[in-house]
Image (cartoon, rainbow, N blue to C red):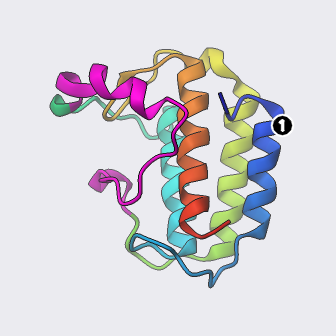
């Protein structure tokens, strides 16, 4: 399974981010490319506890059923709901957000799965380090596909 902690998978994502255009057209959703980069950065910040979150009640109830589906082989579905904590609606600078996201990816990967283990996800609760690597890969892939990259 693809993971941000697997060097070839991470490098493939990096190459796709380089191909992302500031004015690129999205295939679904509301965010422009710079907002998407900021949104992805917020997800990585949560995974590294820079932006700590607690699991929501709905997640406690249904996460055990959905976790295997989300972490499985299929890509994340289009227009999946986003927590208001991770919505980016204001204008952002594409180059600034690209550098910020690249830095956060580097930090996440360099830290490795050990420090990620047990960090709570807003919906899925505590994940293993390997689950975080998988989920972050899938989240970044999802948004790159959103912009046709």
Quarter of the image for residue 28 reads: bottom left
Residue 81 drawn in magenta = yes
In front of the other: 66 or 115: 66
The residue at the point 41 percent across, 51 percent down is 77
Q: Position of residue 93 (x, y in %)?
A: 60, 77
Q: Position of residue 125 (x, y in %)?
A: 34, 23
Position in image of residue 79 (x %, y %): 36, 60
* Residue in the picture at 47% in, 79% down: 91
73 over 102 or under it: above or below: above
Number of numbered discs on residues: 1
Magenta residues span 59-87
SS at mark 1? helix
Quadrant in which the C terminus is drawn: bottom right
Where does residue 6 sit, x and y in percent of width and height? 76, 29
Choose top left, top right, bottom left or bottom right for residue 11.
top right
Which residue sits at x=68%, y=35%?
4
Q: Is residue 91 left or right of residue 2?
A: left
Q: Quadrant of the N terminus?
A: top right
Q: Nearer the viewer, residue 17 or 1?
A: 1
Q: Which residue is mark 1?
A: 8
Height in image: 42 above or below 17?
above
- Which residue is at 53% across, 35% downward? 135
Pick the front one: 60 or 111 = 60
- Residue at the far front: name it: 74
- Mark 1 Cα-neighbour bin, 10 Å: few <14, some 14–19, many ≥20: few
On screen, residue 16 above or below 32? above
Reply yes or no: does residue 66 show up in magenta: yes
**Location of residue 58 by image quarter:** top left
């Amino acid at each position: 399974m693809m993971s941000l902690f697997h060097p070839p998978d991470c490098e493939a994502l990096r190459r796709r981010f380089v191909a992302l255009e500031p004015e690129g057209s999205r295939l679904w959703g509301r965010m422009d490319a710079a907002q998407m980069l900021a949104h992805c950065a917020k997800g990585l910040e949560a995974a590294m506890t820079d932006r700590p979150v607690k699991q929501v009640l709905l997640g406690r109830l249904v996460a055990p059923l959905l976790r295997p589906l989300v972490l499985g082989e299929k890509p994340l579905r289009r227009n999946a709901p986003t927590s208001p904590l991770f919505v980016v609606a204001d204008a952002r600078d594409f180059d600034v957000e690209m550098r910020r996201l690249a830095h956060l990816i580097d930090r996440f990967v360099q830290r490795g799965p050990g420090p990620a283990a047990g960090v709570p996800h807003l919906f899925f609760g505590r994940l293993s380090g390997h689950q975080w690597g998988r989920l972050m890969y899938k989240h970044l892939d999802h948004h790159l596909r959103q912009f046709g990259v």
